[in-house]
Amino acid sequence: MKNSENKGILNALNNFAENGDYMKRFKKLNILTELRLLSLHHMIFPAITIAICFILLNLIDFDNVFRPTTYKNSFDAYLAYTNGEESVTVTIPTLKYTGYNIMKGDRVVSVYYYDLTSDKCMFYKLDMQYESVEDIPRTLTDVHISGKLVEPDGLAKNMMESFAQSISWNYESLRACSFPVIMDEKEYNPNVYYFLYILILVGIFYSLYVLATCIILFIAPYLHPAYFKIKPYYKDMSYFKMIDMINNNLDEKVLIKAGRMYITDSFFINLGIHEVSIMPLDQIVLAYNHGKLITFFGIHIKMNHTLHLRGYKNVKVLASRKKATHVTIITDYIRDNYPNIIWGHTKENIKAYKQILATEKANNK
């Protein structure tokens, strides 16, 4: 009985030890956990973008703009307008010149015509250009027009008032026997809608790409570019062994912590909201800090700092949108412990960095 109790205790201790190792290993996956959280954070914007793009596709009647329905008379076109169509195509047997147009200097840029084939009068503002008023045709036959039905603006109302006087009417009588809208050919500009449509499609596909990338990195955070970027430094080490080594180093050997930036005995690690970056300290060749002042209507809001680190094999990492105090803590430590690093973004330093890379490349041939 006592032996069985001792055996049970030993089994319990073994299970506890195994569970302890498991929990310890799970704890060491903190970088992977941060990468998952970062991926979730980066899913928000593309998801919102996709939703907005689909809302715009539903709100804007692109089909009506790209393929406007053709109507045989002004009355049918107006009826379509009352049913929600703004862009239409109309075939009109005859349009007559009102005698009024829009000028730009001495040139005619738009001409007003009218149609009386329906029960009411429809005015048409056509996008026609002539060198002089004498060149304007008084009658147009078999006209095929794509335009937008709009309420008369100030110029159109002035035209109608003058036109009414020219036929010995008054404006109110003319308005009573006219449609409340006019056909404006210039307002129909499908190129703007083509551009907007393409922009929406690009937004959807790019956002889907970003969203898919975030999902992949959430499922498999070890595929993050932060790891691939520094793999050239560890050619003799397997990829997953390198990841474990970096995770263990962060878990056990943190020397400096400043915000979301860490200095271990071997690495600089940034677990930022905007990016995750990793750089072996002994591989840094050039480092510099870039400050950017954020202003709002001329008011200084804050100063964002970005720490740039450039290493051998032309590996570049950064830690962006950091507080000045946090960047100072990190840079002071690196300066004190790695005196061979070149500091500052100057032409001379960049030239020296490129020379070091060229020398390294020549030595590795």
Image: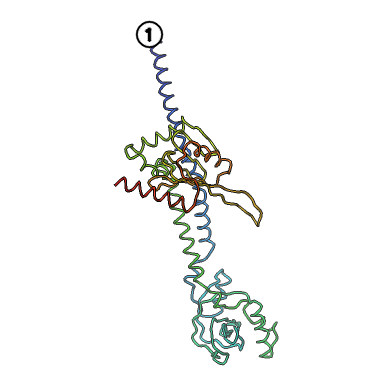
Circle 1 — which element? helix
Provide the residue designation for mark 1.
3
The answer to whether residue 101 is left or right of residue 263 is: right
Q: Is residue 301 above or below residue 185?
A: above
Please provide percent x and percent y for residue 135.
Answer: 54, 91
Pick the front one: 199 or 325: 325
The answer to whether residue 238 is left or right of residue 164 is: left
Pick the front one: 99 or 213: 213
The furthest residue to the top: 2
Please provide percent x and percent y for residue 197.
Answer: 48, 64
Count the numbered circles shown: 1
Q: Is residue 232 above or below residue 189?
A: above
Q: Is residue 268 above or below residue 96?
A: above
The furthest residue to the bottom: 134
Pick the front one: 37 or 174: 37
Render colour scheme: rainbow
The local crowd at label 1, few if under 14, some if 14 to 19, many if 20 or more residues have their Cα within 10 Å, is few
Residue at horizontal 56%, vertical 49%?
291
Residue at horizontal 38%, vertical 12%?
7
Q: Image quadrant for the N terminus?
A: top left
Residue at horizontal 49%, vertical 52%?
346
Please provide percent x and percent y for residue 333.
Answer: 51, 37
Please provide percent x and percent y for residue 163.
Answer: 65, 87
The three-letter code of the residue at mark 1 reads Asn
